[in-house]
């Protein structure tokens, strides 16, 4: 099952809570939380690398297809149209318009962008966990200050 950004954010809402009455437990939870989110980050980074490799292959295939260099058998195997340009004669410099508007390429780019956002979010969460002990220390210091100790 693929990890969803919405699920990660919902988990983090719960996991980020620090119970001021149980600071010792919150401190001990840091290692568990770090392991949990590090696993998600590692898996997501690998998924991103795989999608980027698939994207490079897709770009090569689309280039072959748009430039008429793909065999009929390969086109049939992918279920693509035999005339990607719809009978138009397109200048080499204008081909980017076709690549950029290609639905397969756009979909692949969106998946990569989604995974990049997921990686960035998980990195931010891990960074927050890394400094969690400082937040707990600040809570303790504040409690000492407000109680006059």
Image (spheres, rainbow, N blue to C red):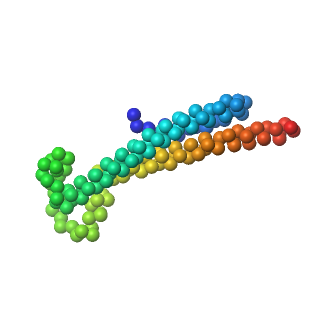
Residue at x-position 17% and y-position 55%: 70
Residue 99 seen in the current view: yes
Residue drawn at (29%, 63%) of the image: 97
Q: Quadrant of the C terminus?
A: top right
Where is 137 relative to 62, above or below?
Answer: above
Camera sees residue 86: no
Q: Going by the image, does 25 lie left or right of 76?
A: right
Q: Residue at x 26, y 64 (%)?
A: 95
Q: Residue at x 87, y 38 (%)?
A: 148
Kindly indicate the quadrant of the structure image that contains residue 88.
Answer: bottom left
Q: Where is residue 29 drawn, in percent x and y?
A: 62, 32
**In the image, is 22 to the left or to the right of 104?**
right
Residue 53 in the image, given as x and y percentages of width and height: 33, 50
State the image coordinates of residue 80 (x, y, percent, origin top left).
19, 50
Q: Is residue 146 left or right of residue 129?
A: right
Q: Nearer the viewer, residue 101 or 38?
A: 38
Count of numbered labels shown in the rendering: 0
Which picture quadrant has residue 143?
A: top right
Direction left: furthest residue: 72
Comparing 49 with 142, the one in front is 49
């Amino acid at each position: 099952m693929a990890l969803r950004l919405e699920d990660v954010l919902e988990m983090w809402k719960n996991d980020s809570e620090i119970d001021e009455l149980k600071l010792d437990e919150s401190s001990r939870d840091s290692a568990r939380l770090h392991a949990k989110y590090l696993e998600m980050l590692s898996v997501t980074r690998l998924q991103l690398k795989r999608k980027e490799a698939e994207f490079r292959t897709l770009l090569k295939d689309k280039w072959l297809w748009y430039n008429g260099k793909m065999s009929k058998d390969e086109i049939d195997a992918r279920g693509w149209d035999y005339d990607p340009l719809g009978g138009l004669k397109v200048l080499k410099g204008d081909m980017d318009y076709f690549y950029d508007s290609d639905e397969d390429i756009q979909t692949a780019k969106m998946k990569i962008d989604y995974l990049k956002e997921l990686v960035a979010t998980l990195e931010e969460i891990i960074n927050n966990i890394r400094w969690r002990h400082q937040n707990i220390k600040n809570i303790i210091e504040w409690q000492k200050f407000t109680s006059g100790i």
